[in-house]
Amino acid sequence: MEVLRRKIAQTDADIEVIHENQGSNIESEAELRRLKQLKKNYQTNLENKKKELDSLTKEAKNREKEKAQVDRLRASLAAKESKTNTMEERVNQTKPLEDLKEQESELQCQNKEDQVIIQDENASPSDKEAAEGRVAERNEELAHLQTQIAERERGRPLLERVKEIFKKYGMTLTAILIATGTTI
């Protein structure tokens, strides 16, 4: 804008020089008209630039307001997420251990299904990305679940943990007693 102001001032000076030096003949009149039109064009450009600057300034202020609003919304979202997570932890603490293990196995099965999609050469890239995103979310949830299960396991009596091990590997206490009785 400063450049346009200098050009307007220069054009005014050129007009004054022509008035003083040449008087009023036809060539100087044409030159004067050209210079006056040039001055008018510069002034129009200057006004347009001022309007553009004003609109850009308003736009920048609006963006700052929107950014502040987005920051506030993100902060409230983070607060709500943490509140939701604490509520889920409380709910999960009241869930029986078997339910937690069942939920863990379901998540692992879903991850296996998505791994098949990821490794499929015929799957579209968008499907693969979506599957990768779901796997990542489930892995976070699995890690959280596994820590809860481990805490619950540590809190159980030794007898229950031993029974769980036997159930896991398909052995019963009677089968072990029979085997040891046969051996003895």
Image (cartoon, rainbow, N blue to C red):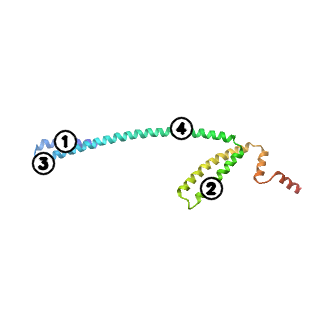
Tag 1 secondary structure: helix
At x 61% / y 41%, what residue is drawn?
85
When asked about the image quadrant of residue 53, the answer is top left
Numbered disc in front, either 2 or 3: 2
**Residue named by callout 2:** 113
Q: Is residue 68 left or right of residue 9?
A: right
Question: Image quadrant for the C terminus?
Answer: bottom right
Give the distance between the C-alpha atoms of the residues marked 1 and 4, in whole angstroms.
Answer: 61 Å
- Would you say the residues marked 1 and 3 are in contact, meaning their CB atoms lie under 8 Å apart? no
Say what secondary structure mark 3 lies in: helix
Q: Nearer the viewer, mark 4 or mark 3?
A: 4
171 relative position to 18: left or right:
right
Binning the other alpha carbons within 10 Å of mark 1 as few (below 14), some (14 to 19) or many (20 upward) gives: few
- Distance Cα–Cα, label 4 vs label 3: 73 Å
What residue is at 43 percent from the left and 39 percent from the top? 64
Q: Position of residue 95 (x, y in %)?
A: 69, 42
Q: Secondary structure at mark 2?
A: helix
Q: Earlier in the sequence, mark 4 or mark 3?
A: 3
Which residue, given by chain and number where applicable, does mark 3 sit on?
27
**Is residue 69 something that shows in the picture?**
yes
Q: Is residue 90 above or below residue 123?
A: above
Disc 4: which residue: 76
Q: Residue at x 67, y 45 (%)?
A: 147
